[in-house]
Image (spheres, rainbow, N blue to C red):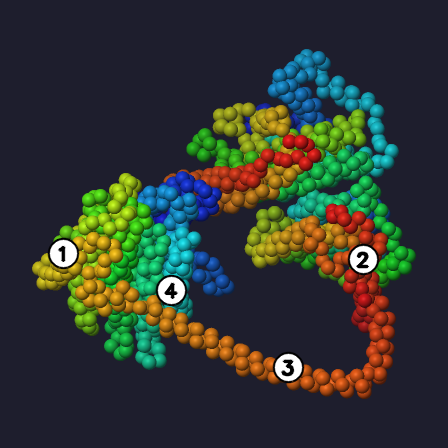
Amino acid sequence: MTTTSVPSSESWLEVAPLQARDALLGLLPESLHWIASSVLAIAVLVGAFGLMFAYLTLAERKLLGRIQNRPGPNRTGWAGLLQPFADAVKALTKEDIVPRDADKVLHALAPVSLVALSLIGLAVIPFGRHLVAIELDAAVLYFFAAGAATELSIFMAGWASRNKYSLLAAMRALAQLISYEVPLLLSVVPVVLVAGTLSTTAIVAAQGGWAAGFWPHWHVLTPWGFSAFCLFMIAALAESNRSPFDLPEAESELIAGHLTEYSGFKYALFFMAEYFGMAALSAMAVTLFLGGWQAPLGWLEVLPSYVWFAAKLLALLAGFIWIRATFPRLRIDQLTRLAWKFLVPMALLNLANAAFWSLTAGWSGPLQAVRWAVSLAAVVVPFLLLSRSLFSGLGPRVYRYAPS
Amino acid sequence: MSPLHLCLLLSTVLFCIGLAAVLVRTSAILVLLGVELMLNAANLNFIAFWRYGPGGDDTGVIFVLFSIAVAAAEAAVGLALVIALHRHRRTIALKAANQLRG
Amino acid sequence: MSLAFLALALVCVVTASAAMISRNLIHSALLLVLTWIGLAGLYLWAGADFVGFSQAIVYVGGVSMVVLFAVLLTRRQRDEPLVLIPEAGVGRVVAGLAATFWVAALLVPAMVVAPLVQRAGPGPTLTVKRIGELLAGPHLVAVLVVGVILTVSLIGALYLAAPVTAEDQPEWDNGGTGRDRGNQEEPS
Amino acid sequence: MTLSASLLWLIPATPLAASVFGLFAPRTARTLPIAGALLGLVAALGLSVAALAGALVDPAVRATSDFAWFTFGAQTLRLGWLLDPLAGFMCVLVTLIGLLVALFSTAYLRHDPRIGRFFGFLSLFVAAMLGLLVTNSLLLLFICWELVGLASYLLIGFWYERPAAAAAAKKAFITTRIGDLGFLIGLVWLHQATGSALFHDGGAGALDAPTLARLSSTLLPGGWAVSTAIGLLLFVGAAGKSGQFPLHVWLPDAMEGPTPVSALIHAATMVAAGVFLMARVFPLMAADQGLATVPFHALTGVAVIGAVTALLGAVLAVAQNDIKRVLAYSTVSQLGYMMLAIGVGSWVAAVFHLITHAFFKALLFLGAGSVIDATHHEQDLRRLGGLAGRMRVTFATFALGTGALMGLPFVFSGFWSKEAILHAAEGWTVSHLPFAAGLVGVVLTAFYMTRLVLEVFFGKARGEGAAHAEESPGLMRGPLVVLAVAAVGLGWLGLPNWPWLQTRLQGGDWPVHGLGEGFGLMVVSTALVLLGIGAGWWWYGRVKRTDARALDPLARSWPAVHAALAGRLWLDELYAATVGRAFAMLARVAAFFDRWVWGGAVEAAGRTAETVGQVNRAVDEDGLNAGFDNTSEHLRGSGRRYAKAQTGDAQSYLRVVAIGLAVVGVLLLWGGVR
């Protein structure tokens, strides 16, 4: 935690978290400040995201229910508001079953490491103007290095269970996560290219200000940025094993895949890790593309920066839930085809597009219109061509063992 | 002992562990992992000399970046070879790949 | 000498030795992942952040996946999840360890007594921007060459690992020793 | 609004973007590539007009904008863009004609399944030509030049299913490549001699006065100036591209492409490139003019070749039966006029004629295309006829184009530009032959065009297609009308007493003289035109041809002459008999050597060896066998023992290597520590 002095020129709400931190640290001797501030940051992050996890599950169930024309949980507490805690009590009191042949150590290690790895990425997200746990020069790289290890946990879970469906799920997870790691990283590179930095705070700072007084400099509001944002979100869906890319845990094909042999608290941990991963990727998307904590309009800056960040984050998470309620699951071949034949070429072309954008940064006047037109064309034309080729040659599927 | 010497000692130990795996283990995959470990030990040396060396040059770090990139390629090709070996010989024991024996 | 270094060095050595001794390939791979993480930590400790994160992404996120895939694809039988490697012969172990010992006996004293010029004080700082400038400037040719190497090796790996049809089987592949002739009719 | 030199690249870039779009669109796409190409051409036209406006602000200024292409060690290769009235006028010309041709093509190729691809090629063609026009570097010009060649290859061979089209494309490509070889040598030589790839570079460029003075003062063995040699080499390239004798053979065959392509090639893009190149490097070509000691001036060569081509093209056009071939040879002839003008020192007249010719030749070709389309691909004069009544608009515009091409006095543009050329040729002091050739060419032009119009549009329909022809659709008539207006009116831009165009092109003063000074020449050439028309009417108009199989009237009068002309003076056959034959001979000689001399030697050696072997075998089996067998058994046994070390196990090798390494290290240490 950076212990910068509190700037005085800002609104009270903006600096309130910093003042609260300093007040707490003041209770301790000077020599313990460094460790105390770290612990404090971790505690706040875990607490906030833990609470968010709890209510996200409720929100998901409620939203899914509404979309499927049913009420969702509404018995525990007012309108079901206590449901997450009831679930937690249930999960904690359940019997923990470990298969006899399982690789016991790995079996226990998998959910724990998954949760831990899903959380550490949050350390570099700037949640507000002054709210970032670690300021790193290579923060984006750190985030993806932390995320890269989650795949191993899923593999460990699937493999340690000694269950053939779990193992199949582990293989699928590996294939899927490797495939989607590529477009995920490639869709981030344009942002790094244009912002010229790997530091998350600098990337957010680069998105400050407005063109013509109303058009925020958020990356998502440029043609290449919009394309990269869409690619990032699709890849993020796949990376967090969310529907419609939830093949590794497809309950109808793999009896929940790597989760089959888990119960009780470990199962809850997996569940938690999924939401943490989703939240971390969404937070990264907000940071990279949606302007981080920047307010959309100048006069809206009366609200503190972290409120804006939270609003954007929640909007993205709601989008995740909505997508889950809307799309059917992909087949494994469709999944890999989408990654390699659409997302990766799109992301590569988008990289060239971003290079063009940053090279033409000096253009003004009518050339600005040319710049927008070229960049827009460089998004739309490949999209049309690639999506056409993605669906070409696909007739109705012939099932080998089922009568047609 | 100075920090630089400690780093070098650590990298030597890692190198020797990798070497032992390469020389002793029968599984081609483990041999490959041993090679990776030896590469990593070499990388550690670069970093150590960059950190504690006379200074003024950042080539060590750049070299390690290249080394990591090439090691990734090496792993991919090596494991593809293992898979090819397995397809032809139904085993991944290196002893099986002795078509050139006299 | 900091505690962090000793702890990381301990992690590296222990996990690496365990990985190389383990008879379970999956355990070996996962333990080696820990070694790689330890090495990434050492890079961070030395101040080379970018290299550390690169190490984590490439090895933990990439190489380990490939290794695990290779392990799963080369299991001897479909329903045998544990990968046990036939034990090496005693002669092989002894010869290998002797050779290693010779190399170690040569290297370790050399490393310990070597008179090295050292810098005192804090280590050099290297920003990501500087790395980018170095890569795009003096080392540009190397970057391009590495790009070509990666492409070529990717294609080569694809070619090697792609399934062959019966006609593609090389002529000399008429099944080595008797033991290896197992389920030849089922290409993986 | 004007366009500065630093943005000139936008002019070729817009059609280039359209071509990329057209070429990478799905194969069956139609609307999008067409719309893209038209949009690109319209944008390029607007930009070109803006550029021309910028260039006309002060015609004497050459605006350049250079950039470093790449740095190679200490050397930087710089390329650039150049904007002067020449480039400006040419850009407007190319984009305008390109746009009209593209509009025409939308109707002409409406049934072709590959129309999208066609528009991609067309855009590429125009883009390459535009790049060639606005560049400030001979190297960049050469790159675009080759792109033009590639695009023409693709377009001529557009209907590649037809063997004739494929062959014609190949012929065009290879013939122009011969010229390009000369160009390339000249380019490399020029770069080596001047050290600059730029034309104008503040005194250091290849076309700047100090450089030229150096080039023309450097002499080669034999007294030739370097600039003469380089100029002639560049002219070889220009001759190939512009269809000059003896490299003109590809141009008539290029008719195999779709007719709009022919219009584009003959009017604005391909053949204009050669003339443009000569105009662009004119300072270089003329650098040796002042030197009395030089045995040969580069421009003299250009003038001679131009005169020969002008005459030859006109002669060959007389007896062709294919409507497009007549026009093609007419183009050859007119290009000869342009080269002639450059050769006699008046590149401005050449460019003037290039501009007017572009419009009326595009008009004539599109008119021919309209006829061909209406008669279901009937191109043979003998089976056409009587179309004047059925296709009024086509006939009217075609007649106007014919008038312009013949140079009917005072109204038509061709008259004024041709007059400028003849006037310049008349004043050339070296020789009067080009002037004479030009005058004869005028008669012949009038003659063959009269023949063409009479055969196609008058008399009786002599074929199925002609009998049921109907006027073409509006999208084809529109460009014709626009071009006809230009074909008539453009000449007024460059009257002798009001030389607006010449002044702008020259970038300085241009001698203004009254109509009276050249009046004698005008009267003579008018008389010659009327003579040609009269002769044409005498043979082809008096008695109308009624049957497609009837003998050509000219052939009835002078069978030998007609046969020679119809056979195109057997130039193709001559090439086949000389160049082709020579290569065949060479190949045969090589084959002979291969088969008999070397082959015989090898055979003899083999036989000898075989005999020796037989003898050896006899000695061996009977005498030495037993001893050798024993020895080899021993060898084999020991070999087997050593082979055991070769286990094929990589790890065992590695172990040995590791131990060896350690031993060597210890030995070294031991030695070093001492």
Instruction: Identify the image quadrant of the N terminus of chain D.
Output: top left
Cα distance in 3D space between marks 4 and 3: 46 Å
Whole-angstrom CA distance, mark 2 to mark 4, is 61 Å
Decide which of tag 4 and tag 3 comes sooner along the chain: 4
> Tag 1: Cα neighbours inside 10 Å, few (<14), some, or many (≥20)?
few
Secondary structure beneath dot 4 equals helix
What amino acid does circle 2 point to? Gly
Give me the disc on residue C176: 2
**Spot occupied by residue D670 in the image (x, y as percentages of width and height):** 83, 70
Query: Is disc 1 in the same subunit as disc 3?
Result: yes
Q: Callout 3: residue from which chain?
A: D
Q: Nearer the viewer, residue D645 or D589?
A: D589
Q: Chain of mark 1?
A: D
Q: Position of residue A282 (x, y in %)?
A: 62, 32
D616 above or below D32? Answer: below
Looking at the rendered image, the disc whose residue lies closer to the viewer, 4 or 3, is 3
User: Which residue occupies 69% across, 51% down?
Assistant: C165
**Quadrant of the image occupied by residue D296:** bottom left
Q: Mark 4 sits on what residue?
A: D175
State the mark number for residue D542.
Answer: 1
Subunit bearing disc 4: D
Q: Within 10 Å of the Cα at label 2, are there few (<14), some (14-19), or many (20+) other Cα atoms? A: some
Residue that mark 3 sits on: D606
Q: Residue D471: name its quadrant.
A: top left
Q: Amino acid at mark 4?
A: Thr
- Amino acid residing under circle 3: Gly
